[in-house]
Amino acid sequence: MSVSEILARIRDTVLRMFPHAATPGLIPIGDPGPDAPVLLSCNFTLTLRRLQRVLAGRDLWLLAADTRGINVWCAAGGGYLTHHQVIAAIRSTGIDRLVNHRELVLPQLAATGIEPRRVRAATGWKSRWGPARLEDLPAYLDRGLRVTRRERRMRFPLWERLEMASMWAVWTALIEGAIFALLGGWQVGIGVAVSTLLSVGGVFAALPHLVVFGRGRWLTYAGFAVLGAGIGSAVVLLLGAATPRAVALEAIGAVIAMAVLSIDLAGTTPWYPSSINTFRNFARIDLEVERCTAAGDCVQVCPAEVLRMNGPLRRVTIARPGACIQCGACIVQCPSDALRFLYPGGRIIPPSTIRETRMNMLGRRTVEV
Ligand code: SF4
């Protein structure tokens, strides 16, 4: 890997919070012919670079839809990768003239936004869901476009979680460090920056074992704020500047770092409220059993293995309700509108609302009703 590529990867990783767009359109990988598979993705530079790396040595067509430089999951969740972008990508690239089939492989994580039946109605192209993670694409292609249960599940290995942490931690640490340096001196600024980097990194490292969703989330953030304050105080002590004021500033800095992080992870904060999960009312996924026709689309797109097909009963079951991340993909894809979000008091968010507004915990969490 060249130095410029390493630098580009670092830039795109640290800046991944901000959209970074490559030119949308058709990208031939290798020497694709008329029978080569056609895969669709976003036009986020980091994703396209990774795709080109994992698909090197193969012959296929890659359609980069115009998602305004946002990655697949966030774009689909936020309404920037829907069937409209897929239809536009098919029509604008002339892919119809280059291949003699009409089958498109969609990234599974786009299921919150794309409705394949609408793509088919507008273009004649059939869609199938690929794996959740692009790293699994080579095995998926080798298997003849068959996805395994393991590949449907979204996994966040430690290095990826730390990569995610960097997008929050680096910026928060730099900005907070500068502000607190002005307020209390450079030692305090360094203390706040170090404690922010470590406490935010600690949250992401421990994420699979933490409560960041639901009522217990406040305890998690409070715990990491105390940890951050302790780290910051230790740093100012080491730098020989430990005063009551400096320690108090470290504590304030640690609370701010956790408050910033909770905007993304908790789903409901004073800064970023949510229509799905309000402070007192948490929606959960619900299946109207009598509507279920066992089409199985929901099972194919669920990234958390919440839903299972019960073969003997010919029915879908909610096998792991606690694992639901409220992405809404199953609701969008169910052809019989059997899934919805349900509040403890009985209020529901119907599928039509989810489809029209793309309301889900990954993108647009709040809609005006
Ligand atoms: S909303 Fe829950 S059950 Fe439905 S696809 Fe997302 S994680 Fe799975």
Image (tube, helix red, strand yellow):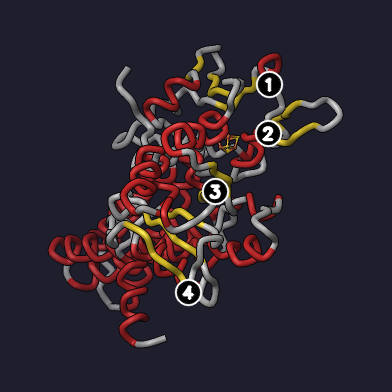
Marks 4/1 in contact by CB < 8 Å: the verdict is no
Tell me the mark number nearer the camera, choosing from 4 and 1: 4
Q: Which residue is mark 4?
A: 30
Q: Position of residue 155 (x, y in %)?
A: 59, 56
**Can residue 5 be spotted in the picture?**
yes
Badge 4: how crowded within 10 Å, few (<14), some, or many (20+)?
some
Which of the two discs, 3 and 2, labels the residue nearer the N terminus?
Answer: 3
- Residue indicated by mark 1: 292
Question: Label 2 near label 3: C-beta < 8 Å?
Answer: no
In this orientation, does residue 199 appear? no
Residue receiving disc 3: 103
Q: Quadrant of residue 187?
A: bottom left
Q: In this picture, is 252 found above or below 297?
A: below
Is 332 left, or right, of 65 in this rendering?
A: right
- At horizontal 40% and vertical 39% (from top left) the residue drawn is 82
Q: Which residue is mark 2?
A: 296
Quadrant of the rendered image containing residue 76:
top left
Depth order, front residue of 16/295: 295
Looking at the rendered structure, the secondary structure element under dot 2 is loop
Q: Amino acid at mark 4?
A: Gly
Mark with earlier residue (4, 2): 4
- The alpha-carbon separation of the residues under discs 3 and 2 comes to 19 Å
The residue located at (36%, 51%) in the rendering is: 65
